[in-house]
Amino acid sequence: MLENIKYIGQSGTGLDSPAPGSGLGFFDWGAFVSKIFRVCAAIFLCSSCVSAFAADLKDMIGRWRWQQFTIEVTECKSDSICAKIIEGPKNVGMEVFATKLMVKDGKLFGPIAHPETKEIYNTRFQQNDPDRWRLDGCTVTRVCLSGEFVRVK
């Protein structure tokens, strides 16, 4: 019965046998190493893509469109950014960021004032690409909104 067992070898004929005591039996080490290499390469590529859009406060500097409002984000103080409504149906000139945004796990977090209602939303900003930020936030009374800041060019 054991004479019908084929060992995986380089020739593919089944005539190659592992070195005595190697324990290689039916295991194809070449395929195993190849799979491990591909998995490691995929993890590396995915992690480098994620880090490409890891949030930094300075990434938000510029002009952004949100709903019918244009918001200008500028550097203020040495380690913070400020956002002001520069165009819209109401509250032009109002500061949008209630306090300094914090960076955590590649996202920005902080309270922002809704440009129309002035309600404060605890908001998470996630950068989708250099010209888009996804916003998700809720008030203390659990009124929630989501949307997107799109860069004005």
Image: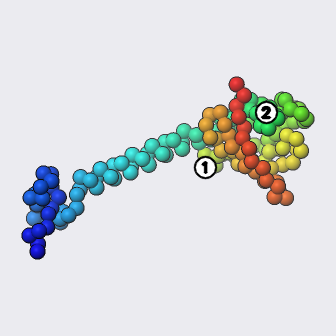
Callout 1 amino acid: Asp
Q: Name the residue furthest right.
A: 90
**Rendered view: 20 above or below 124:** below
Rendered residue at 12%/59% (across/down): 14
Q: Name the residue furthest bottom.
A: 1
Q: Would residue 127 be found to the left or right of residue 146 on screen?
A: left
Rendered residue at 45%/43% (across/down): 45
Quadrant of the rendering where the N terminus is positioned: bottom left
Q: Can you identify the residue that label 2 sits on?
A: 71
> Is 116 in front, or is 97?
116
Mark 2 Cα-neighbour bin, 10 Å: few <14, some 14–19, many ≥20: many
Q: Can you identify the residue that label 1 sits on?
A: 105
**Rendered view: 31 above or below 49:** below
Depth-wise, is mark 2 or mark 1 nearer the camera? 2
Callout 2 amino acid: Ile
Q: Name the residue furthest top.
A: 153
Counting residues from the start of the chain, the first of labels 2 and 1 encountered is 2
Image location of residue 83, percent across then percent down: 78, 35
Image location of residue 58, percent across then percent down: 66, 34
Rendered residue at 12%/55% (across/down): 13
Mark 1 Cα-neighbour bin, 10 Å: few <14, some 14–19, many ≥20: few
At mark 1, the secondary structure is loop
Image location of residue 131, percent across then percent down: 65, 33
**Rendered view: 40 above or below 21:** above
How many numbered discs?
2
**Rendered view: 59 above or below 28:** above
Q: Would residue 21 be found to the left or right of residue 31 on screen?
A: left
Mark 2 to mark 1 CA distance (whole Å) = 25 Å
Q: Kindly indicate the quadrant of the structure image that contains residue 87.
A: top right
- Residue 77 visible from this viewpoint: no
